Amino acid sequence: MKPSHNLNLICLNKILKYINVIEEIYDFHNIKSVSDLQSNFMCQLAVTQAITNIFELQKKMQAEILSKTPLFSKLFPTMSAARNIASHDYESVDFEIIYRVTKQLTDKLMIQELEMLKNDIKRSQTGNT
C-alpha cells in the first residue's frame, strides 16, 4: 500500500466522520434553517470547527484524488474562506454561508461521491481494479 493512498483514505474517513457529526448536531438541536443556526451558539461553534477540520483534512490529500470529487472540490474556496474567518475573526462569520456549506456537505450525492472515492482507494490498495 502506498503511503499516499493510506493518507488519502485516512483523510476521507475523517471527512466523512465530520460530515456525520454535522448531521448529528443538526438533528439533535433541530437545526432546519439559517435562523436556527444563528440562534444556537453551541451549534455554531461545533459546525464551524467541523468545517475547519474538513478543510484542513482535504489540504492533506493528493490533488489527483481530489480531482475525482467535483462536488466536494467545488466547496474548497468557500470552506477556505469560512475556515479563515472562523479561525481569525470569529465574530465576522456569516452563518448563511456556513449553513449553505453544511447543507452541501451533508447532501446525499456529496456523501455518495466521497464514499465511492473511498471504495476506489480501498480497491486500488488491494489490487482489485
Image: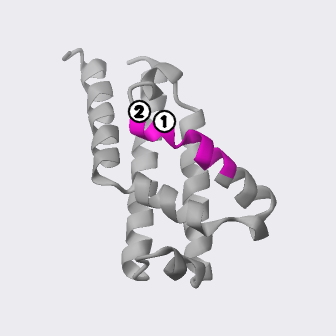
Q: Residue under label 1, please give it.
A: 73
Query: How far across and down, in percent of the image, does residue 44 sit?
Result: 59, 73
Q: Quadrant of residue 114?
A: top left
Most foreground residue, 28 or 3: 28
Q: Are marks 1 and 2 in contact (CB under 8 Å)?
A: yes
Secondary structure character of the magenta stretch overall: helix
- Tag 2: Cα neighbours inside 10 Å, few (<14), some, or many (≥20)? few
Q: Residue under label 2, please give it.
A: 70
Q: Residue at x 61, y 53 (%)?
A: 52
Q: Magenta span covers which residues?
A: 70-81
Distance in Å between CA atoms under marks 1 and 2: 5 Å
Q: Secondary structure at mark 2?
A: helix
**Tag 2: amino acid:** Pro
Q: Is residue 95 left or right of residue 72?
A: right
- Work out which residue is located at the far right of the displayed protein and give it: 88
Query: Number of numbered discs present?
Result: 2
